[in-house]
Image (cartoon, helix red, strand yellow):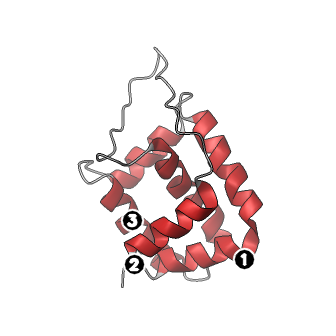
Amino acid sequence: MKSQIVKTLTAIAFGLSLSQVSNAKDENIEVTPIQDITHQELAAIYVLSEICPSQISDQKKFETGYKKLVTEYLPKEKDPVAALNLLSKQSSFAPILDEAKADAKKAGDEKNKAICEDVATYSN
């Protein structure tokens, strides 16, 4: 199931540049994803937390699936969802996050809803 979600995310949200954005001097939060996980993937996953609540009726199922997905991408973090939320607020992450949001918008409601439903059933 993870590979299906990743493939769907890749198809929709990863037309992004693979260039890395350097950290700003004033930021002290560093989330280090597991090897081979890009900040673009983390941005696409974070965007799900913004778009899915309006797409899914069972919020508890979505939150459970989302937490499991984030935990698999950030297994070394004590609280992976909180770590991803902090990363989303960093100025160095903003351009990547903006691209992920634009890609999700381009994908449209139907594709986004399908991904959100996959995440909601991911915990099963």
Q: Give left or right: position of 36 versus 93.
A: left
Vertical comparison of 91 with 52: above or below = above
Confirm whether residue 55 shows in the render.
no
Mark drawn on residue 110:
1
Mark 2 surroundings within 10 Å by alpha-carbon count, few (fewer than 14), some (14 through 19), many (20 or more) = few
Q: Quadrant of the C terminus?
A: bottom left
Look at the numbered disc 3 and give the secondary structure of its residue.
helix
Whether residue 117 is visible to the viewer of this picture, yes or no, is yes
Q: Is residue 68 placed above or below 20 in the rendered structure? A: below
What kind of element bears circle 1?
A: helix
Question: Is residue 87 found left or right of 101 in the rendered image?
Answer: left
Marking on residue 7 = none
Q: Is residue 99 left or right of residue 88?
A: right
Q: Is residue 106 left or right of residue 43?
A: right
At mark 2, the secondary structure is loop
Q: Residue at x 76, y 59 (%)?
A: 106
User: In the rendered structure, which amino acid carries the disc numbered 1?
Assistant: Glu
The Cα–Cα distance between marks 2 and 3, rounded to whole angstroms, is 10 Å
Q: Position of residue 2 (x, y in %)?
A: 39, 72
* Residue 47 percent across, percent down from the top left: 59, 55
Tell me which residue sits at (46%, 65%) in the image.
6
Q: Which residue is mark 2?
A: 1
For marks 2 and 3, the one nearer the N-term is 2
Residue occupying the point 29% across, 47% down: 34
Residue in the foreground of this view, choosing between 47 and 89: 47
Q: Amino acid at mark 3?
A: Leu
Question: Within 10 angstroms of label 3, few (less than 14), some, or many (20 or more) residues?
Answer: many
Q: Amino acid at mark 2?
A: Met
The residue wearing badge 3 is: 69
